[in-house]
Amino acid sequence: MNMWRVLFWLLWGSAALWEALLHLLEWRYLKGKTGLPLDYKETTYLPSFKWDRSVAYAKERLKVSLGETLTNYALYALIVMWGVPTLIDEYLMLKIRAPLLASGLLGASMALLFWICSLPWSWIKVFDVERTFGFSRVTKKTFFRDQAIKLILMSLVSFGGLGCFALLFKSPLWPLYLAIALILFEIVAMFILPFVIIPMFFKLTPLTQGEVAEKLESFLAEMGLKNSGIYVADASKRTLHSNAFVSGLGKAKKIVLFDTLLSSLTPDEVCAVFGHELGHWISRHAIKRMGLLWTAQIILILLAYIMFNAGFGQSFHAQSPQTFAVYAFLFLNMLVTLFFQPLILSVSRRQELEADFFAASRLGGHQMAQALSKISTSNLGWLTSHPLYEMWYLTHPPIYERLKALKDIP
Ligand SMILES: [Zn+2]
């Protein structure tokens, strides 16, 4: 076995073991939580927190997450052992005389493979876990519609991605062109997300009337900001979870509130959640995260360049640029999981605390804490996590940490 293959399997083994270990640590951590510890009682914001149900929900989701993770590693192993990309590529090249089209189709085939493997887990999540805990309202029809859209989007991106890679690869400066193309694609994707992708899943209605609308308007006016669009998503058709998010970049953005949020919170609490989302926007969190993502991507592209020149492709019998790209993607993806993921997520969690602070310092810590604890109680959100699990998986700090951070803000 040559060096790159040995490295691949070493990386595969360490990443799979590490992810399994993190799940195990979190499982043991949750198992130890049988009641409300003393110091949590100081947190007066969680009067009706359903401790046992929240632990049970967290455990069920953890099981599914482990199953999904291990399925992915099994798929990686089979792809490399059987040389799946090489087989598909040879077949496509033989059947289709247009090389660029064949490269794109290899991308779409790989997307289909990953989609098929994720399908059972999506089903379990929606119809087993979410339904058992009374959140999911998704019908079978909506489920398959959503999954079909997911498949189409994944295939389109992979088709374009590999087709583009094969084209750019013709130039010796391909790493440079690839970096530029990726950045451009991500900027365009950010712009069209709120206008094209989100409406595929939710019906968005502008929020213009009522007490909530008035409160949000006057909050915006106080901040000296123009209302460029607050929307309500009909999320209750799919889930009873409540949520809110900012989507898009610059002027082309939308602040979206789930209708479930509006029905479960008081107008003041909705205002606090809105303040949090506004905090993300004012602090330019999206663009900062993009900057970090781009830095990571440039490092990964440079690594791919080094790998190419050091015979990575030959080790995997990759005869074409597109097959090299697939194997390199799997390899680099595991590096991302082990080393980049905790870094990117730590920035994300810090931004969440900043957004909480933004809202709390303008509306009061009590109002923000009240809204957060109500949402986490109704979402059966978990209070704390194992520190390592938090580092590798959580985009938001556990709710207890967020409440603690709000304690000292008047
Ligand atoms: Zn946030």
Image: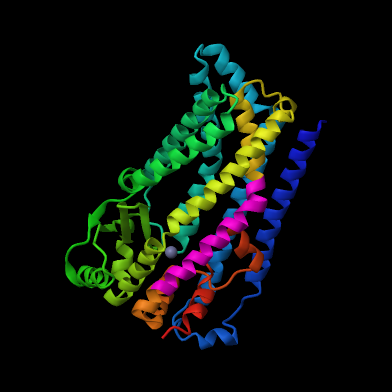
- Tell me the residue at 50%/28% (across/down): 164
Residue with the most extreme left position: 209
- Tell me the residue at 58%/54% (across/down): 65
Q: Quadrant of ligand 1?
A: bottom left
Residue with the most extreme right position: 1
- Tell me the residue at 79%/37% (across/down): 6
Quick check: 238 above or below 312? below
Q: Which residues are magenta?
A: 335-358
With 342 as the anchor, is 14 left or right in this view? right
With 386 as the anchor, is 201 left or right in this view? left
> Is residue 341 rendered magenta in the image?
yes
Does residue 197 appear in this view?
Answer: no
> Is residue 52 rendered magenta in the image?
no
Quarter containing the C terminus: bottom left
Q: Position of residue 136 (x, y in %)?
A: 40, 57
Magenta segment, prevailing SS (helix, strand or loop): helix
Does residue 297 appear in this view?
Answer: yes
Q: Position of residue 265 (x, y in %)?
A: 32, 73
Q: Position of residue 191 (x, y in %)?
A: 35, 45
Using the image as rendered, state which of residue 409 and residue 26 is in the foreground.
409
Residue 386, picture quadrant: bottom right
Q: Position of residue 189 (x, y in %)?
A: 40, 42
Quarter containing the N terminus: top right
- Tell me the residue at 64%/68% (across/down): 387
Quick check: 321 above or below 239? above
Quick check: 71 above or below 28? above
Using the image as rendered, state which of residue 169 and residue 398 is in the foreground.
169
